[in-house]
Image (cartoon, rainbow, N blue to C red):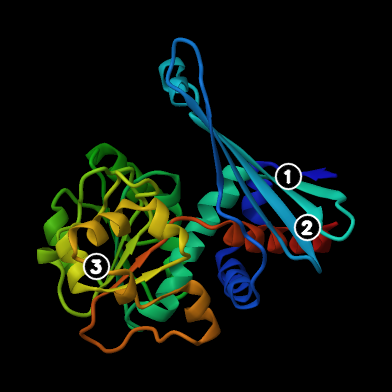
Amino acid sequence: MRVFSAEETRDLLRFDALIEALREMFRAGAAAPLRHHHAIALDGQPDAALLLMPAWNPAGLGGVKVVNVNPGNAAAGIPSVSSSYLIFDAKTGRHLAMLDGGELTDRRTAATAALAASYLAPADARRLLVVGAGRVAANLADAFRAVRPIEDVAVWNINAENAERLARMLNGAGVRAAATTDLEAAVADADIISCATLAIEPLIAGAWLRPGQHLDLIGSFRPHMREADDAAVRRARVYIDTEGALKESGDIIGPIRSGALTEEAIAGDLWGLCRGTVAGRGGEREITLFKSSGSALADLGAATLAHANSRKDA
C-alpha cells in the first residue's frame, strides 16, 4: 500500500482535473452514507471527536476518511485536527493507498465550491471576495479561477494580519490580491463571495448584496454556526451540495426554523446540477447561494483522481 504525504496528495489533485472529477462523480453517484460522529471523553480537556466518512463504488474504488478533532490540543500548540484517507478496491477489499486527509479535504472543499459556481456564478465573474484566511480559504482563488475569469481577489478575515498574510501568499503565486478591512464594501464590489470561516454569528448581511452576485458558504458545518443572515438567504436562490446540509448547517437550519426558507424553496443540489435535472443561474440579476456541508462522495471523487494520477506516475 502506498502512503502519500501532504505535498504529494496536493500534487495529485490539480484543480482543473479535480473539478471535472467531482462533476463526473456527482453525475455517476456512489454509496455515501452520512458521516459518523463519535464523542471521545478525555480527562482534563474538552471532549474529542472521531468522524468517519465512507463512500464506495461497488464496481470500482471505495474509501473512508478518518478525522480526529481534539480541541484541547490548542493549549499545547499542536494542530487540533488530524485526518487520513484510505483507498480500497471495492470488489476485493484490498487496501491500495493512504492520502493526507487534510490536503484532500481542503482541495475537494474548494473544488466543490468552484463546481457549483460553474453552474451558478455569473459567467463573466472577475472579482472574488474570500472571507476567511485558513487552509480552505487559501485554495479558493485557484479553484474559482479554474471555472471563471477571476482577475482580482479581495481577502477579509476577522484577524487583519491573517488576511494580509493570505493576500501576500496569493500575490506571490501570481494572483492579484489585496486584503481589506471593510467587509461591507468588499461584498458590494465582488461578483463571487466565498466564505470559509468558523463563524457562529452571520458575517454576510443580505442588505449588502446586489443583484447578480453569487454567495458561496463553506463554513457552518454545525447547527449553531452561521456565515450569512436570514435576509441573504431570503434574497437568494438557494442550492445545497447534498441533503446533509439540511441536518448539519446552521445556514440552512436557522433560516428554515425562522421561516426565511423552506425545504421546498431550495432550488436543488449538486446531483441535480451536474446531471442537468436542476436549472442553474436563471438570469443576470439573480442572486444565487450555494451551501456546502461536505460530502464523502466528494472525498471519493478526489481520491479516485489521486489514485489514477499516482498510477500514471508509478
Sequence order check, earlier mark of 3 and 2? 3
Label 1, secondary structure: give it: loop
Say whether marks 1 and 2 touch (CB < 8 Å): yes
Describe residue 250's horizontal placement relative to residue 30 as left or right.
left
Cα distance in 3D space between marks 1 and 3: 43 Å
Kind of residue indicated by mark 2: Ser
Q: Give x and y (percent) for residue 220.
A: 35, 49
Instruction: Name the residue tied to disc 3.
Output: 261
Q: Residue at x 51, y 87 (%)?
A: 276
Task: Tell me the amino acid under the disc marked 1.
Answer: Phe
Residue at the extreme top of the image, as rendered: 44
The residue nearer to you, when weighing 59 against 116, is 59
Give the SS element for disc 2.
helix
Query: Does the image show residue 174?
Result: no
Which amino acid, mark 3? Answer: Leu
Along the horizontal axis of the image, is 56 left or right of 261?
right
Query: Crowdedness of circle 2 by 10 Å Cα count: few (<14), some, many (20+)?
Result: some
Q: Position of residue 166 (x, y in %)?
A: 36, 47
Whether residue 100 is situated above or below residue 313 in the rendered picture: above
Please state, as top left, top right, bottom left or bottom right, where the N terminus lies in the image: top right
Disc number lying in front (3 or 2): 3
Mark 3 touches mark 2? (CB < 8 Å): no
N-terminal-most mark, 1 or 2:
1
Work out which quarter of the rendered image holds the C terminus and state it. bottom right
User: Mark 1 = which residue?
Assistant: 4
- Residue at the extreme left: 207
Q: Is residue 103 above or below residue 313?
A: above
Q: How many residues crowd around disc 3 within 10 Å: few (fewer than 14), some, or many (20 or more)?
A: some
| Residue on which the image places disc 2 | 310
Whole-number angstrom distance, CA of label 3 to CA of label 2: 44 Å
